């Protein structure tokens, strides 16, 4: 069965498979308690932090997500936001609205150094496309390791040191206990006054109040944010009016036709389910994401 809101007991009767379309659906535990035959839950999203609950592991219910659908579109959004900042497009558009011809020079993306925090398929897609534009990319994962494409992977416990060596910090991680508050005032200070912050993962990964202060004081130069601690972003948030900030309403991955592609992931898995084959995109509930 497919869920847009909270299902009724009658709808759950006999259901073995649950398709959660609305990624904001947050009461899975209550649903599981009323669905005694449920064996598999599929999320029409990549982030599943709101769906993780003890009942999944206790009952051995498989949770899968839509990993892979948004890789390219989010990477394109990051490139667009980064280039807009470096090339000064917000200032150019402001001058255009004033009918002001003002010659200026801007920066170059080539030769910049970026740290992409998150080694999942989205983080890797971002790193790949930045690399193609001659950006030096460092991947940051949960633990240190090696990657055959991007070389050494730094551990998130080394993020402070990583931040001192890069110009851009891109957060592309799921929301877990380990990633909550990962980018704080100390990391922002290490990034420095020319630094640019991008967050397309989950809002609480960045300590928002400390980012606001860093932007106001010039501790960092700018930010492109698609996710926030509270969504929708409150109307009184200072982020709305900052000229060095791009506020995007949690839409970096959404493109025309994405719904069809997400359904395709589910249909492929459903065929596997019916054949008794291994499902794709199985989320490890202890970590909150698809491992490997």
Image (spheres, helix red, strand yellow):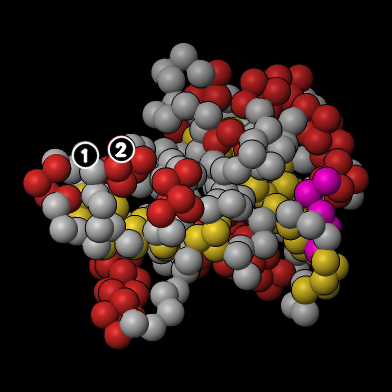
Q: Is residue 154 magenta?
A: yes
Q: Which residue is mark 1?
A: 6
**In the rendered image, the vertical position of residue 287 relative to residue 272, given as above or below:** above
Residue 118, numbered circle: none
- Residue toward you, 273 or 124: 273
Badge count: 2
Query: In percent of the image, x 81 and y 54: which residue is there?
Result: 155
SS under mark 1: loop
Residue at 27% over, 67% down: 263
Q: Residue at x 75, y 77 (%)?
A: 149
Secondary structure that dominates the magenta span: strand
User: Helix, strand or loop at disc 2?
Assistant: helix
Quadrant of the rendering where the N terminus is positioned: bottom left
Circle on res. 30? 2
Q: Are marks 1 and 2 in contact (CB under 8 Å)?
A: yes
Residue 38: x percent and y percent?
A: 28, 57
The magenta stretch is 153-157
């Amino acid at each position: 069965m497919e869920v847009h809101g909270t299902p009724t007991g009658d709808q759950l009767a006999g259901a073995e498979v649950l398709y959660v379309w609305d990624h904001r659906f947050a009461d899975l535990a209550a649903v599981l308690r009323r669905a005694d035959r449920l064996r598999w839950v599929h999320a029409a999203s990549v982030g599943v932090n709101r769906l993780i609950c003890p009942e999944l592991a206790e009952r051995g219910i498989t949770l899968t997500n839509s990993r892979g659908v948004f890789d390219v579109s989010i990477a394109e959004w990051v490139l667009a936001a980064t280039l807009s900042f470096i090339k000064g497009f917000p200032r150019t558009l402001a001058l255009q609205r004033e009918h002001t011809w003002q010659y200026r020079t801007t920066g170059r993306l080539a030769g910049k150094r970026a740290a992409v925090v998150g080694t999942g398929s989205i983080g890797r897609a971002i790193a790949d496309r930045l690399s193609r534009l001659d950006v030096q990319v460092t991947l940051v994962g949960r633990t240190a390791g090696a990657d055959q494409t991007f070389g050494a992977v730094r551990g998130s416990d080394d993020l402070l040191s990583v931040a001192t060596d890069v110009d851009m910090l891109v957060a592309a991680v799921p929301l877990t206990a380990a990633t909550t508050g990962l980018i704080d005032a100390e990391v922002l200070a290490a990034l420095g006054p020319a630094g640019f912050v991008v967050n397309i993962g989950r809002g609480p990964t960045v300590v928002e109040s400390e980012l606001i202060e860093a932007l106001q004081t010039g501790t960092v130069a700018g930010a492109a944010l698609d996710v926030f601690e509270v969504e929708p972003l409150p109307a009184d948030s200072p982020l709305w009016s900052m000229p060095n900030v791009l506020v995007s309403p949690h839409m970096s991955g959404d493109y025309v036709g994405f719904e069809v592609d997400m359904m395709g992931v589910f249909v492929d898995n459903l065929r596997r389910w019916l054949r008794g084959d291994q499902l794709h995109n199985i989320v490890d509930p202890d970590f909150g994401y698809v491992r490997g």
